[in-house]
Amino acid sequence: MSALLRILAWTLALALVALPVVALVNGWIGAERWPLRTLRLQGDLQRVDADRVRATVLPFAREGFFAVRLDGAQAAVAQLPWVEHAEVHKRWPDVLEVRIVEHRPFAHWGEDRLLSEHGRIFPRGELVPPEGLPRLQGPDARVADVVALYNESRALFAANRLEVDAVALDARGSWTLSLSDGSTVLVGSSEARLRLQRFARLLPQLLAQKRQRLQRADLRYTNGFALVFQDIPFQDIPFQDQPPQQAPRT
């Protein structure tokens, strides 16, 4: 037998061995012989719909144990609402295992999104988030700054038995807070933390002077606060004897 014939014979033999393997791996054959019969969901699922997960991975499972595209199934599951992380594995002989980590909401972010405990913004979707979440707002690139000021202001106002319901940072860098007593605190863009510390420290004294509900506090003054109480005219309360300067535009 010539060398050429030997090469052709070996090539044909290799093809006869390799083609069934390729066909099996690509799902051309064997899907009905080695089907995936069991879907195993792992994770503490509170808001991710198990039926929706099943419907998402079913087209991939139909390809059979050897041909299932795990990366495609994993990417599809990761796109489902409230899924923070997903992993898809196969277990011999017929199990498709899906591990899901849900987003754990920390706060509302803007109008229709949520912020997770890991600082990730995700769509709220049709699901109702837990009650009592604070409302945070700002440029997406400033998430860490907004969360930091929220946490600091919570600690500051806790001594006055007040909760911080909302923190907003506008496009000009100006801060606004909403407190649990219904009052609004205009902080501005300059020395926000220092002004909040000073205001929270003096708040019991300021409230004791009027004994009425505070509607708004404007901290954008150099020497004092501008306070608005319920059903009474606007009033300035300076730190010193000199009148406060005009509030800057922020």
Image (cartoon, helix red, strand yellow):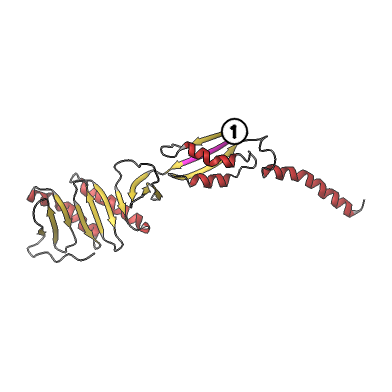
Would you say the magenta stretch is mainly helix, strand or loop?
strand
Residue 64, by quadrant, is top right
Name the residue at 27% across, 50% down.
166
Name the residue at 23% across, 51% down.
178
99 within the magenta span: yes
Give the magenta-colored segment's residue range. 95-100
User: x, y (%) of residue 186?
Assistant: 21, 57
187 within the magenta span: no
Note whether 39 is above or below 109 in the view shown: above
Residue type at tag 1: Arg
Name the residue at 31% across, 51% down.
136
User: Label 1: which residue?
Assistant: 37
User: x, y (%) of residue 125?
Assistant: 40, 46
Furthest toward the right, the residue is: 1
Note whether 31 is above or below 197 in the view shown: above
Furthest toward the front, the residue is: 126
Note whether 189 is above or below 232 in the view shown: below
Q: In this view, does 185 lie to the left or right of 81?
A: left
Number of on-image labels: 1
Q: What element carries label 1?
A: loop
Name the residue at 8% across, 53% down.
232
201, 126: nearer the viewer:
126
Q: In which quarter of the image is the C terminus?
A: bottom left
User: x, y (%) of residue 31?
Assistant: 66, 38
- Badge 1 local density, few (<14 within 10 Å), some, or many (20+)? some
User: x, y (%) of residue 94?
Assistant: 61, 34
